[in-house]
Image: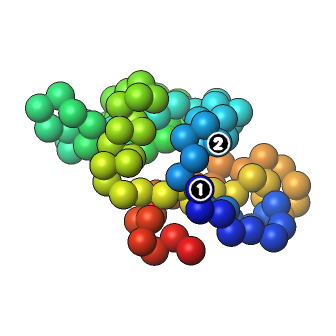
Amino acid sequence: MIASHTRESEAHTTTDHELIQDWVEERGGHPATVKATEEDRQAGILRIDFGPKDEGLDEIGWDEFFRKFDESGLAFLYQDETSDGKLSRFHKFVRRSSAG
């Protein structure tokens, strides 16, 4: 696991599947892929969809999501809380090599 943080409002970076899934589900999200980037029924560019449903995304299962996540060498950059203490949905995918 890659981790870097000091305050809850600051960003954290992880590759831990369970932590990522818990963070997403706690916020009502689900794993998705951008429809236009799918190839041979395989996930393309990964996204987290919090709704309302985005017509440009296809919902995928966690197993497929994490297979693509690991194959692509990604890490998950996220924030637990906003600076005013509210639950944050801020996140993005970064290359593991640039996650520090």
- Residue at position x 79%, y 54% from top? 81
Q: Residue furthest right?
A: 85
The percent position of residue 89, horizontal first and vertical second, equals 65, 48
Q: Nearer the viewer, residue 79 or 18?
A: 18
Q: Are marks 1 and 2 in contact (CB under 8 Å)?
A: yes
Distance between the alpha carbons at the discs numbered 1 and 2: 10 Å
Q: SS at mark 1? A: loop
Residue 79, above or below 60: below
Quadrant of the snapshot with the C terminus: bottom right
Quadrant of the snapshot with the N terminus: bottom right
Q: Is residue 76 left or right of residue 69?
A: right
User: Which residue bears the numbered disc 1?
Assistant: 1
Residue 19: mark in rendering: 2
The percent position of residue 40, horizontal first and vertical second, equals 11, 32
- Residue at position x 21%, y 44% from top? 37
Q: Nearer the viewer, residue 96 or 61?
A: 96
Residue 19, above or below 85: above
Residue 76: mark in rendering: none
Circle 1: residue type: Met
- Residue at position x 48%, y 58% from top? 75
Is residue 48 shown to the viewer in this render?
yes
Q: Is residue 11 left or right of residue 66?
A: right
- Residue at position x 74%, y 68% from top? 5
Q: SS at mark 2? A: helix
Is residue 34 shown to the viewer in this render?
no
* First along the sequence among labels 1 and 2: 1
